[in-house]
Structure formats: structure tokens, C-alpha cells
Amino acid sequence: MYEQIAHSLLNKILDELKPEIRKRDLRHFYTRLGANFYAIHSLFHLLYGKRDDFERQMLRLVEVMAAQYILREKPLKKKDHKREHDHNWFLSQKWVGMALYTDGFSDDLQGLRERIDYFEELGINMVHVMPILECPQGASDGGYAVSNFRDVDERIGSLTDLRVLAKELRQRDILLTLDVVVNHTSDEHEWAKKAQEGDEKYQDYFYIYKNRDTPDVFETSMPEVFPETSPGNFTFDKSMNKWVMTVFNDYQWDLNYNNPAVFIEMLDIILFWANQGADIIRLDAVAFLWKKIGTTCQNEREAHLILQLMKDCCQVTAPGILFIAEAIVAPVEIIKYFGEDAVIAKECEIAYNATFMALLWDAVATKNTKLLNQGICSLPEKLERSTWLNYVRCHDDIGLGFDDNDIYQVGYDPKAHRHFLVDYFTGNFEGSPAKGQPFGHNEKTGDDRISGALASLVGLEDAIDKNDAKAIQQSIDLILLLHGMVISFGGIPLLYYGDEIGTYNDYSYLKDVSKAHDNRWIHRPQINWERAEKRHQKDTPEQKIFDGLKRMIAVRKTVSSFADYNNRELIETENSHLFAFMRNNPFEDKDKDNVLVVGNFNNLPQYFSLSDLRNRGLFEYEFLQDLYSGESISIVEDKLVVPPYCFFWLVNRKV
Ligand code: OTU
């Protein structure tokens, strides 16, 4: 029944398409449109079906998809076909990513192109180039306040530079990830300016209110994202004499997805960047896409419908493109960004594994894995054909968003435990070598998050200051341990630029008025390329970290059990300092090894008992080889010793 309605509307739309679209050979476009139209129609109807202009908006949507399809260049269309055929391509263990700010890494896009060798040296084949779109001169939240969605910021280059970079990456089999900031625009964006001038069409692109009545009601249930620097969720705009919803900074205006025109514009922009050569689009702040009075305005059902609709439309025009969901929310909510009530991912194929990241940091501070094990145990199963982005650090703060229940389960009090973690990472806990800073202190809830560079949080900066050789080695081991976990966990590991050479906190942001109030800049460095040269100098920390990571990445690529087919099994151990899991071979091929991963988060050696695993038939072995070091590992009475801050990737094999 419903299919018939969708079909007849589709026929009508095809008749009404502009002549320049109708004339083209759009064979593949129409096949995909036919396959996806029922879903697209249903979702668009759920969101906008009550509007009088529903059919006109639907026609506009199809026109946008078709127009971008026509603009899509041959090599990209070819790639779409290849990926449709090999649709699990991104689950392979072959992919390893790095996220970076262009200006911090290489000044500009041309400079970035000249550094591709560096990615290849380390083994990186997915590069997430953080926001490069035009943004205001002063504060722009690192480019997350976009003033023009269709051009590159001139400070780092031009659209041509980007296209040249994309082409070269493509030739070298490196994936390009770009950001599309879907939740908000800068107050200097044309839409915002027109709204300020009183244009009602554009006022309807945002959440704008005459007085405080509605904002006040919203505020009763909305938390604050930047309570210290941008309290409240609304900003008074003098030129309009009205209030605008600004959930993030006061210069970031939230887009109103109740308006189908906003959805269509943003889809057009996503497809525009897909057509510039992006392989993966990172959708920023997706949890915030739908606002509803009386709710936290995060993780609303409609936010998921919008993402599903974006995915289905993208599937028609550029099916090779993947979406990353950036949803730093509670574990049970994160998992929904792959799609709810589905078997196979239908929203975003990739999501930030913020849960695992925060749990790893918990293990660092406590030197035990109680909460890490508990948290991973309660992490719901993800869908098929979806994968995690696993990371240790990124450009944002570390939020302590564990599930309170999990914290209780392991015997801590949630509030006290979070306090301890903040104290630990800001160096205010006895014996802590960490040099982080509290971020986003919330007066109302007492919550804090944490800023700081990896090397400074694990104590490398402190150890080098003190010239303490043992502490230097321990923090290097810890950096490698953390990466050893994210590289083998299942998903795409995403390294953060500078961490591969142990870059410390950078305090220079304090001298820039547009950054000084936001200490996340402490961990957004300018790469010191002279220092990076030390990676070739034996026994320097730079060399030890770089070569350790390089080795891990190279080994990962050869181990097919590290591909992500939900083939991980958490191993309970009696030893609460260890984190252990099996990566089982997901393929028919019986010759491929199952890998047992074991990491020790304690500063003392720990025993790992294998007999239980053997008894349960989980891991049969005679000889143990550690794939990372290549060495054989001795076992005494079914026990193996894991040195402090050390990890193994074990297989049954004689060296
Ligand atoms: C994202 O962040 C970006 O990663 C941040 O750099 C931006 O400031 C922000 O959006 C606004 O564009 O929205 O879903 O600590 O984790 O702001 C999560 C807060 C986000 C960040 C949060 C995050």
C-alpha cells in the first residue's frame, strides 16, 4: 500500500524533473533511486509529511540528488561501483587513520600534500583533515563555526588545492575524511546574516524567538555544552532584537531541521564535499540535530531519522561514501547512531568509540581494569556492517561519560570517582605525573572534563622535565599500550597528529585572544618537524614511540582477525590489572590465527592464567608468539607474565 503511494509520487517527480536533468543518461542514478525511494519517502514523510508543500520539497530533494550525481566525476563513480560490489571494504584491518588540523600539521593544504610520505612511513591510510571550510577570522571553534559551506578557508588554501590533494591521496590508496558541521553555522554565515537583516525565510533556518518565553522553557531541560565559556543555550541578537538558539558557543547558531529546506541544503553540502573527493564524511555533533521542548535536545528520535534520510539519499548519489557519527554521548546512545531496530547499519557506518576511550583513561589513572572491563561488558553489540573509530586522544577534551551503573558495579561512587579522575589527570593527586587541565567546569553539576596532550597526560612531559629515565620509559610503554589496545580492538584506529612523536601540551594558545579561554587548544599543537626528525635517532622517545606505532600498524594490516566483524570476545580474568580479549578469525579460512590480546595497566608485572581459556576451548595453544614483538613468550604452569604497561598480541605458533 505505502509502496504504491511512494511509487506514484516517484513517477510524478520523474515527470516533473527539470529538462536538463531528464535528458541525461542517469541509469545508475535511477536504479539506486528506485531501490531507496520507499525508505526516503517514508522518512521524509515522517519528518515533514504534515506540510502543505511536502510534494514540492520531495521534488526539490530528488533534484538535488540528481544534480550532484550529474556533477560527480567518473573516477568517483567508478569507486562507488567498486565499493557497492565489495561493500564490507571498510571493515578490513587494513585501514589506520590519523586526525589533524591542517595549519597545525603542515601550515596549509599544499604542505599537507608534501607530507603524504610521512603518513606512508607510519602506515596511515585514512587522513581526517579537520574543518577546512571558510570560517571567521577570530574565534571559530577551530573551524567548527562555518561561514561558507562551499569553499575552503583561504588561510589554508583553495578548493583546487583540496581537489589536488584528494586526487593524490586517491592514487596512493589513502582515504580522505572531511568534516561537515551539520548542526550549526557561524553567525557570519550568509543565512545568519540574512536572518539578522530580517529575512523570514532565513530566520526559519534557525531557532529564533521574539522573547525569552520559549528559550526559558527549553532551558529547564537542556544541559550546557560549554558552561564556563558559553553558558545557556540561547544568545540575544541585537540586530534582530531576538533570541537565537546557540547550544555550543554564542557564535554558533543551531540549524532548524524542522524546516525541510535546511535538510535539503545540508544534504546538498554533504554531496558537494563527496564530489570534491572525500571518501568519508564526519558529521559533527549529530546527537544535537533535533530540539524538542522538555527534553535534553540530544539523541532525539528525529535526529536518527535525519541521519537515516541523509544516508539513504547519499546512497543514491554517492554510494561509496561513509559517514562517521560524532556523538559523544552515553554508551547506550552512541550505539544507536549505527541505526536503531536494524540488523545492518543504516545511519552512520562508523562512530567514535568515546566509551572505550574514556574507559582506557580510567584504567590509566586507577592502574586497574575494573571499570574498563565492566564498561566494555555492558557496551551493547553493534550492528553488522558498522565499525568503531577507536582512539586514545582527539582534538576535544576527555569527557568522563561512563555509565553510573557501571561505576557502582565495580564499587566506586560515581561522583567521587570522577573527582578522582579529574584530580589525577590535572596532577592534583598524590604521585600523579599527569599535566592535564580541567575543562568545561559545570557549577550546577560539579562536573569537569579534561584537556591535555597524550604525552603530558601519561607523564612523559613530567618525566623528561625531571630527567627520570625509568619514568620516561614507563610513559612511553603506556603510550604504546594504549595504542596497542585501540589498534587491535576491532574498528578503525584513529591516531591524533603529534602523538606519534610524543608531542606535549602546547601553551602558546594563551597568547591568542580568540583561543585563550578554551584550553582544548593545549592539545592542538603545531608539529615541530625538527623534533619529528628525532624519530630516526635511536633510543629517543620520538623514535621509540614512532617505531612502536609503525610496527603495530604494519602487523595489524597482516592479521585478518583484526578486521571488524564483531569478532571480539572479552575475556574475564581474575587479575584486575589486565584487559584481555580474543579476536577470532571471522573468515572460513582455518589457517588464520585467532589472536589473544592482553594488556597490563599496572606498574608491576602481572600474571595471566591461560588454563581457564584452554578449558573453555577459547584458545588452544602449544607455543605462544607475540605478533607485536615477534618473540616467543614462555608459559609456566599455564601462566604468563605480563610486564608493567606491556601488551601482547598472542597466537599459537612456534617462532
Ligand atoms: C564537536 O564536539 C567538535 O568535535 C568540537 O570540536 C566542537 O567544539 C563542537 O562539536 C561544536 O562544533 O558535539 O557530539 O567536549 O565533545 O562539543 C559531541 C564537547 C560534540 C565535545 C562536543 C562535541
Image (tube, rainbow, N blue to C red):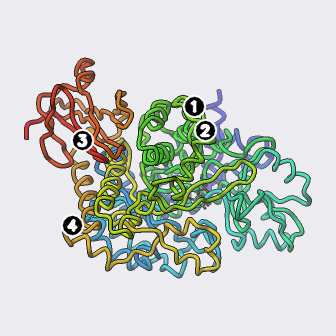
Q: Is residue 336 above or below residue 239?
A: above
* Disc 4 secondary structure class: loop
Kindly report the distance in space between the C-alpha atoms of the residues bearing marks 1 and 3: 31 Å
Q: Position of residue 243 (x, y in %)?
A: 85, 62
In what quadrant does ligand 1 lie?
A: bottom right
Kindly report the distance in space between the C-alpha atoms of the residues bearing marks 4 and 2: 41 Å
Instruction: Give neighbour class at mark 3: few <14, some 14-19, many 20+ (Cα, 10 Å).
Output: many
Residue type highlighted by circle 4:
Asp
Q: Which mark is residue 414?
A: 2
The structure residue drawn at horizontal position 48% and vertical position 45%, both measured from the top left corner, is 362
Residue type highlighted by circle 2:
Pro
| Label 1 close to label 2 by CB (< 8 Å) | yes
Q: Which mark is residue 500?
A: none
Residue annotated with mark 4: 539
Q: Earlier in the sequence, mark 1 or mark 2?
A: 1
The mark closer to the camera, 3 or 2, is 2
Kindly report the distance in space between the C-alpha atoms of the residues bearing marks 4 and 1: 43 Å
Kindly report the distance in space between the C-alpha atoms of the residues bearing marks 3 and 4: 23 Å
Q: Position of residue 495 (x, y in %)?
A: 38, 58
Q: Position of residue 294 (x, y in %)?
A: 80, 41
The mark closer to the camera, 1 or 3, is 1
Instruction: Give neighbour class at mark 2: few <14, some 14-19, many 20+ (Cα, 10 Å).
Output: some
Q: Is residue 588 above or below residue 26?
A: above
- The answer to which image quadrant residue 545 occupies is bottom left
- Between residues 82 and 503, which one lies in front from this camera angle? 503
Q: Is residue 179 above or below residue 132?
A: above
* Disc 1 secondary structure class: helix
Residue annotated with mark 3: 649
